[in-house]
Image (cartoon, rainbow, N blue to C red):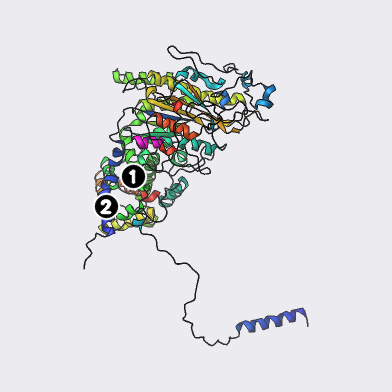
């Protein structure tokens, strides 16, 4: 008697033939990203990483040097060290109190001397203080903040927050997520949610540029056809974990991106315009304005591999509708165990100034959906931990478990300070989760609380963080 | 007795002892009773349909070091940009990044495409200048000079494809998939001869092998 059931092999063969058309064509990325186009998403995200562990005394969590004096150091275990910056007159040697902006409320926050121009934008900021990082290891700390999940030993768990966002929101942009000089993880979303991950700006532009070596057009087409043919049942079985599908989706995404000629958006060289074409004039003016906004050279080559250049790159990616999320290793040189206060402050200020230029740019740029770009952008600035409140015998500061973070823009309660570090050794604060006020029966603020807040601020499902957002940090 | 004589006698005795035929032992009757053992029963591999459609470990993307070695091994030459792009391809620098990324993402796909084009066209060019098939990389099954590719027999094309798939993937093409690759090879050849770009027929074939998922996973 013949078996009426279809054998597994036949079934897989048939399924492979069917899947081949959808797996290998241009459909998958488009299906994920719908029809990708250069239109700014309604909500954008920027994750700004200060690499090496920033000194929050110099920026987000200052202490008054007249109160926390060297004479009281055995009692407070805190030494602001602002006087050590006095050799550079551009640094204040006291706590920075922002000047009130026209039409904005009185500043509710103070900053350290390295905050730079960002203090001017206090009315769009929320500072989270006294975060318990639960680690003083670099890779553990930044992976904790990138994912909102405490790593297992030093191994990251889950997806990066940026991957989580584009995985859930499926934005109709050609490159949903960019990760520049920073790790990115994807544990459950299709390959198109993977970040375009590069270590240098030139690599980003190269990844978006057509291959330098081209083939005869017909041979190119035949090559595309060969790659697009259906897979065998064996390869279907091999791909049950999805790695091959991820690669195929990446190739599909690549075709989509190269077809859009996105590399041109990042080129800031001026075009010759002998024919007085108004469109070229307009593009050249936009390039000149961008160079001026980010203090880049007025002419010649632009080095994107500087904090200001990286901020300009973020602005292009968001404003041109190329990406929804940009994760950026904005500034380094902060792991100053042996460096001076001045070195650390100079490096850190370069990062805050770059953010200030970006915020200023986004505030001035109208968004197609109404309001300005900052009204549609949520930004998070963080580091893996902070530095010890005491200066070590080498003139530097070591790793400290308590840290701060900065939230900017859409969905955030502006001009807000949430949480606090203790006045003795800046220990992680115990606070009321709703108000951020010190509460002896409260809890520590953890990185996952901040990540849940970022997700909730945009209405994205935050259940992966297994915590709830910090309500006092959410607008409205 | 002198020491030398004593050594000689001992040596002779040993030689005799070693070379003397030993008396064969009487054969024993084989014991056919199974030998009891404590080995636990070996479970068969689980049915893929009962374990989410897969068995064994998940495939992995090759690391940058593996990619570099693979390109060198398969083509005999190196992609000039691989070290420069290593960080963005996923290589750890152990300064800022201490874990190798093996995500097959857009950047990896794009850079591999660039690399395959550079290496494959150079390899194809070198093959065209080589009359000895044994010294070629791509056209190993084509005897004599690499003349009009349209004249290649069906069998030669198939043999060459099987050779290349084994060389690049360690897995020979077969069945319907071989037919498809053969049809593409034929199309490459016809177009290349018309456009007088013979190098590109072999180059495109090599690019297709090098950018196939089987080249970058294990």
- Rendered-image quadrant of the N terminus of chain B: bottom right
Q: In the image, which disc is placed on residue A408?
A: none
Q: Which mark is residue A15?
A: 2
Give the camera-side residue of A365 and A101: A101
Is the residue at mark 2 from the same chain as the one at mark 1? yes
Frontmost residue, B55 versus A253: B55
Q: Residue A380, percent across and down?
A: 46, 28
Name the residue located 45 percent from the left edge and 18 percent from the top edge.
A123
The chain ID associated with circle 1 is A
* Residue B125 x/y as whole percent: 36, 47
The span picked out in magenta is A162-169
Q: Quadrant of residue A427?
A: top right
Give SS at disc 1: helix
Of the image marks 2 and 1, the number of the one nearer the N terminus: 2
| Closest to the observer, A193 or A232 | A193
Q: Which residue is mark 1?
A: A248
Residue A311 shows in this picture = yes
Q: In front of the other: label 2 or label 1?
A: 2
């Amino acid at each position: 008697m013949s078996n009426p059931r279809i054998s597994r092999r036949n079934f897989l063969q048939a399924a492979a033939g069917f899947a081949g058309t959808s797996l290998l064509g241009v459909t998958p990325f488009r299906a994920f990203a719908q029809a990708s186009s250069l239109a700014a998403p309604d909500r954008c995200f920027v994750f700004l990483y200060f690499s090496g562990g920033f000194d929050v005394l110099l920026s987000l969590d200052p202490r008054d040097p007249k109160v926390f004096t060297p004479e009281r150091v055995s009692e407070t275990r805190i030494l602001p060290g602002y006087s050590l910056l006095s050799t550079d007159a551009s640094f204040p040697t006291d706590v920075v109190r922002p000047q009130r902006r026209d039409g904005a409320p009185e500043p509710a926050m103070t900053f350290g001397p390295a905050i730079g121009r960002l203090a001017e934008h206090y009315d769009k900021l929320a500072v989270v203080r006294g975060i318990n990082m639960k680690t003083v290891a670099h890779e553990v700390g930044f992976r904790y903040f990138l994912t909102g999940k405490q790593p297992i030993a030093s191994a990251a768990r889950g997806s990066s927050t940026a991957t989580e966002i584009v995985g859930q929101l499926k934005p109709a942009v050609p490159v949903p997520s960019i990760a520049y000089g920073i790790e990115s993880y994807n544990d459950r979303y299709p390959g198109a949610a993977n970040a375009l991950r590069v270590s240098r700006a030139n690599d980003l532009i190269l990844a978006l540029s057509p291959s330098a070596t081209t083939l005869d057009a017909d041979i190119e087409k035949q090559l595309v056809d060969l790659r697009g043919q259906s897979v065998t049942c064996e390869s279907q079985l091999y791909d049950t974990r999805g790695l091959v599908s991820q690669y195929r989706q990446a190739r599909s995404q690549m075709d989509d991106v190269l077809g859009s000629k996105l590399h041109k958006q990042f080129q800031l060289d001026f075009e010759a315009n002998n024919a007085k074409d108004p469109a070229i004039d307009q593009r050249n003016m936009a390039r000149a304005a961008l160079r001026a906004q980010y203090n880049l050279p007025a002419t010649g080559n632009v080095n994107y591999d500087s904090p200001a250049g990286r901020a300009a790159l973020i602005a292009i990616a968001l404003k041109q509708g190329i990406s929804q999320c940009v994760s950026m290793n904005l500034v380094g040189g902060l792991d100053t165990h042996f460096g001076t206060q001045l070195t650390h402050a100079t490096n850190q200020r370069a990062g805050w100034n770059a953010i200030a230029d970006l915020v200023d740019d986004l505030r001035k740029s109208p968004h197609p959906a109404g309001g300005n770009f900052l009204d549609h952008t949520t930004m998070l600035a963080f580091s893996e931990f902070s530095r010890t409140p005491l200066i070590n015998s080498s003139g530097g500061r070591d790793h400290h478990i308590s840290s701060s973070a900065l939230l900017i823009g859409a969905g955030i309660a502006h001009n807000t300070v949430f949480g606090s570090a203790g006045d003795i050794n800046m220990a992680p604060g115990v606070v009321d989760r709703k108000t951020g006020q010190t509460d002896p029966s409260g809890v520590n603020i953890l990185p996952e609380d901040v990540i849940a807040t970022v997700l909730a601020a945009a209405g994205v499902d935050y259940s992966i963080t297994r915590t709830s957002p910090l309500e006092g940090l959410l607008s409205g | 007795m002198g020491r030398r004589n004593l050594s000689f006698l001992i040596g002779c005795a040993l030689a005799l002892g070693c070379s003397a035929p030993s008396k064969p032992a009487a054969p024993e009757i084989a014991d056919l009773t199974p030998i009891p053992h404590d080995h636990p029963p070996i479970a068969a591999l689980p049915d893929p349909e009962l374990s989410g459609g897969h068995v064994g470990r998940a495939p992995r993307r090759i690391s940058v070091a593996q990619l570099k070695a693979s390109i060198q091994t398969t083509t005999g030459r190196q992609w000039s940009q691989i070290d420069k792009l290593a960080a963005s391809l996923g290589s750890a620098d152990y300064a800022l990044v201490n874990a190798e990324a093996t995500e097959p993402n857009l950047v990896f796909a794009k850079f591999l495409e660039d690399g395959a084009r550079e290496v494959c066209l150079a390899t194809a060019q070198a093959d065209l200048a080589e009359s000895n098939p044994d010294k070629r990389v791509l056209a190993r099954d084509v005897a004599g000079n690499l003349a009009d590719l349209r004249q290649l027999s069906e069998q030669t094309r198939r043999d060459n494809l099987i050779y290349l798939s084994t060389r690049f993937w360690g897995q020979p093409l077969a069945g319907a998939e071989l037919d498809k690759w053969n049809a593409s090879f034929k199309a490459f050849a016809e177009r290349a001869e018309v456009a007088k770009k013979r190098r590109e027929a072999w180059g495109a074939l090599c690019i297709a092998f090098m950018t196939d998922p089987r080249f970058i996973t294990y």
